[in-house]
Amino acid sequence: MLDLHVELIIPVAVVFVLMVAFLNAKLYKPMIGFMDDRDETIKKDLEEANNATSNVSEIKKEAAQIVAQAKEKAMSMKQKSTEEAKTLAQSKIDGKNEELAEAYEAFRVQMEKERSDLKNALTSELPLFKEALKAKYSQI
């Protein structure tokens, strides 16, 4: 049935061992080395991506802080300018009020003078008015 030939088994075994050694040296070791290098490159790329992600989140936090500080500064500048404008407006209003008070006082003094002048003029002409009234009564 099946005949085993020892003289053929030995060379086939030797060829098999030599072929495994040759394939190991020329094919498997370079392929395993390439796969190890690829795994190492993938690990480095993942680490760099993680670092970049953490850097991005840190940069986003810094940007958010800068924006918050800018908003606070803008708010304080707005409040300061509003207060300055209110102070300026109030000083202008106070100045105008003083000016109007002075003008009113000058007007009041002049009216008082005109009143006294008119009173004096009417008092000095009172006898003429009395005579004119007597003349009118007498005509009636």
Image (cartoon, rainbow, N blue to C red):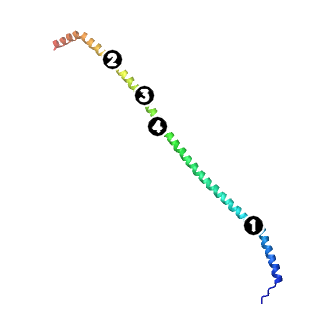
N-terminal of the two: label 1 or label 2? 1
Which element type, helix, strand or loop, lies under badge 2? Answer: helix
**From the viewer's perspective, is the residue at label 1 or at label 4 nearer?**
1
What separation in Å lies between label 1 and label 2 (alpha carbons)?
Answer: 118 Å
Instruction: Bin the neighbour count of mark 3 within 10 Å (Cα to Cα): few under 14, some 14-19, many 20 and up.
Output: few
Q: Position of residue 43 (x, y in %)?
A: 66, 59
Which element type, helix, strand or loop, lies under badge 1? Answer: helix
N-terminal of the two: label 1 or label 4? 1
Residue 29 got which mark? Answer: 1
- Which quadrant holds residue 130? top left
Position of the C terminus, as image quadrant, is top left
Q: Which residue is mark 2?
A: 109
User: In front: 68, or 96?
Assistant: 68
Instruction: Bin the neighbour count of mark 1 within 10 Å (Cα to Cα): few under 14, some 14-19, many 20 and up.
Output: few
What separation in Å lies between label 4 and label 2 (alpha carbons)?
Answer: 44 Å
- Which quadrant holds residue 97? top left
User: In front: 32, or 128?
Assistant: 32
Residue 79 got which mark? Answer: 4
N-terminal of the two: label 4 or label 2? 4
Kindly indicate whether the residue at mark 3 contacts the one at mark 2 (C-beta within 8 angstroms): no
Residue in view at x 62 percent, y 53 percent: 52
Which element type, helix, strand or loop, lies under badge 3? Answer: helix
N-terminal of the two: label 3 or label 1? 1
Tag 1: amino acid: Lys
Residue in view at x 59 percent, y 53 percent: 54
